[in-house]
Image: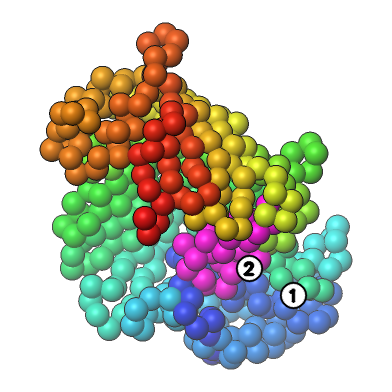
Amino acid sequence: MNKAVFRFRPGSKTPRLTAFLCLSAGMLAMPGIASAMDVNNARQILQKVMAQHDVTATETSATSHDGIASFHYDNVHVPLGGYEGDRDLVMSNVEINVNDDKNTPRYVSIDFNLPEQASISAQETINQRNLTMHNARGTVTWNTQTQSPEGFTGFANFLGADEPVSRQHWLLSDLKISWLTRKVDLAWKDAEWTGPNREKMGAMKSAELSLYPDSDGTTRLDYAHDGMWLPGLFQPRTVRLLGHATGVKWTSARPILQQGLSDLLSGMRPSLVRNNIANALWHEALKTGKPIDVEKLYVESRNLEAAGTGQFVPQKNAAYGFQGVLDLDLVGREQLEYLLGTPKSPTILGALFPPAVDGLAAGTPGKQGTSKYKLQLLADGRITVNGQRVMNGPGR
């Protein structure tokens, strides 16, 4: 048996599925790995990578067949540096197979299978988690020249985390991740998250996100979710969004997304990865000054429906990074007025947020019983609805 150690970057937070992927991907980050894998070469590379990153793992078996190096590990401890306090992702019975990509010599493929049960260990009991992972598996395509991931596909029939004392949990099923050269796809079903004592805080029946190149080489985004539930009066149960970054070429977007993949596999906090991607894409759009088109927006929530289109132009000195306009047709205005009231007679809820009351009252009659709204985001952060200011910019 062999033990080795590696450490993720300080301040990172490891997603539950991807925490161990960096370990497996790192096996290929050394020159010469693109040749047929044998156990000794793979083990030497693995031990060096582990030693750099402070992960401990007990190798229980290692075999080589048809140019593929296969490893099994128990007692895998992956430090989760992005959490408050010391925490480790702990797993056993981790399987990794490494083999050459026969179509592209500089690429190698890492197939992995994660165990059914794992845990997050921590000094504070409230920070501990019991993890359940049904059929969690995937493949990392590793570029040995750039020493970075070229693509990733991952699947899990079910993922769940449960805190043993407070009993708060999150779970989802049918997770699919495809992070490839020409497209990024994320999808899941039946997600749920709770507070202490399993007080339901949110749920979603399904969600899908895609990023891909348009016919002219610019970047498109499709997003949809169904069955969202949140504790509150307004629940965007169904959302459809089609967007087009007309000033961001896919050739520029793809390296940004690839860096996001590298960060994710290295254990960076997912929310930080999303923010970094959004910020980098905004800077790319800013270079050309071309707009982000909202080609289709549809939202449904409790007898309310809104559909619209819009356009937002990135601006360096804009309070929120953009100025633009969104045209909406609303069905169910009377339902909102019942909840919020009018400027002259707001309800208690409406009195808590007067801009919503003022904006609702500014609607004008549209076709087939709809109310029409033109929302404008000005460079100084002010928001107007049909020409009426409903919110001041920051600091005003």
Amino acid type, callout 2:
Ser
Q: Is residue 8 visible?
A: yes
Q: Is residue 234 magenta?
A: no
Residue at 39% across, 19% down? 364
Q: Main secondary structure of the magenta part?
A: helix
Residue that lies at the very extreme toward the top in this rendered image: 368
| Mark 1 neighbour density, 10 Å: few (under 14) some (14–19) many (20 or more) | some
| Mark 2 neighbour density, 10 Å: few (under 14) some (14–19) many (20 or more) | some
- Looking at the rendering, which quadrant does residue 3 occupy? bottom right
Amino acid type, callout 1:
Gln
Disc marking residue 224:
none
> For the N terminus, which image quadrant?
bottom right
- What segment carries the magenta color? 259-285
> For the C terminus, which image quadrant?
bottom left
333 horizontally vs 223: left or right: left
The residue tagged 1 is 147
Q: Is residue 229 above or below residue 83?
A: above
Q: Is residue 297 visible?
A: no
